[in-house]
Amino acid sequence: MKPYLWLTLAFITSGLVRIVVKLGSNYNPFLFIFVSYSTGSFLAWLMSQKFKEKSSKSLMKNSILLGVLIGIINFFAFYSQLLALSVGEASIIFPITSLSVYLAVILSVLFYKEALTIRKVLGIFSSILAIVLLSW
Amino acid sequence: MEWLLLTLLAFLGFGFQDFFYKVASSKRCNSYLLTFSFLLTVTLISFIFCLFQGLSLTSTLLFLGMTNGILFSLTTLSRLESLKELPASIVFTIIRMSLILVVVWALVFLRETLNFRSLLGIIFAFLAIYLLKGEKK
C-alpha cells in the first residue's frame, strides 16, 4: 500500500479516534482504555496472522520489545495527563500535550537527520498555529 | 504548579512515544506485531488499575471502547507503515491535523457554531497539509 494511502488512513482513523474518545470521556478512563486496547490488541493479532510478514527472529524480538516500551510510555503519559486534568485547566493542558508531536519531529531531525526544507518548516509552523487556535 | 509538572511529563511521554514509532519504522519492525505488543501491554496495565477500582461495564462503554480499539489499532498500524517511507515531520504533522475532523463533527452533529478563531485554525490546518503533502524525504 503506498505511503500516502497509509497516511490518509492514519489521518482519518486518528480523527475518528478523537471523536470516540470525546464521547467516551464520561466513563471511567481506565475501563475505557482496557476495553479499547484489548479490542485493538485482538484485532492487531488477527491482522498479524492474516498478513504474515517475513521477519527474522531478532526483528520480531525488536518489534515486541519496542511495542512493550511504547505501551508503558503511552500508559504513563496518559496517566500523567489524567492527573494533570484533575488539578488543572483542560483548556491549557490539552493544547500543551497536543504539541508533543513536535518533540518527536525535533528528535527525528536530530537523530535521523531528516531534512527540513522551507516548505516543511512553514507547514509545521502552520500546523502549530492550527493546534493553538483549535485547542484553546 | 503540580498540574504543570504533570502536563510536562505527559508532553514528554507522548512525544517520546511518537519518536519510538519513528525508531520502530526505521528498523523496519513488524508493524502488526509491534501494534499487538503495544496494545497488549497497555491492556494489561489498565487491567491492573481497573482491578483496584471495582468498575462496572455498560453496553455504551463497551460499544465505544471496542470502536475506539478498532480505530486506534488501525491508526497505530498506518502510522508505523507511513513512517517507513515518509519523514516524521510530514507524518506526525499531517496526522495531528486530523483535529479538523473533530471540528467538522462538532459543527455537524453537535450544532456548534464556527467562530473566527476556529475558522482560522481550520485554514492553517489545510495550509499545513497542502505545504507538507507534496514534500518527499
Image: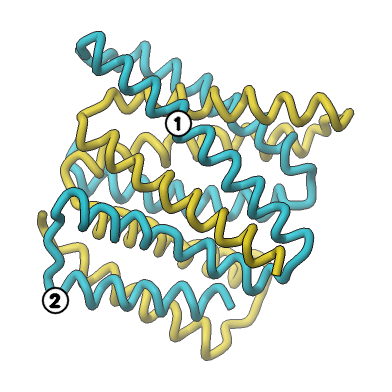
Density class for disc 1 (Cα within 10 Å; few <14, some 14-19, many ≥20) is: some
Quadrant in the picture for the C terminus of chain B: bottom left
Numbered tag placed on residue A69 in the rendering: 1
Which subunit holds the residue at mark 1? Answer: A
Q: Is residue B78 above or below residue A44?
A: below
Q: Is residue A103 above or below residue B30?
A: below
Chain under disc 2: A
Amino acid on which disc 2 is placed: Ile
Q: Residue furthest bottom?
A: B116
Q: Nearer the viewer, residue A22 or B51?
A: B51
The structure residue drawn at horizontal position 29% and vertical position 34%, both measured from the top left corner, is B24
Residue beneath disc 2: A118
Between A84 and A17, the one nearer to me in the picture: A84
Shown in cyan, the chain is A
Image coordinates for residue B123, horizontal then vertical, percent:
38, 81
* Chain rendered yellow: B
B82 lies left or right of B116: left
The N terminus of chain B lies in which quarter of the figure?
bottom right
Q: Earlier in the sequence, mark 1 or mark 2?
A: 1
Which one is in front, A135 or B12?
B12
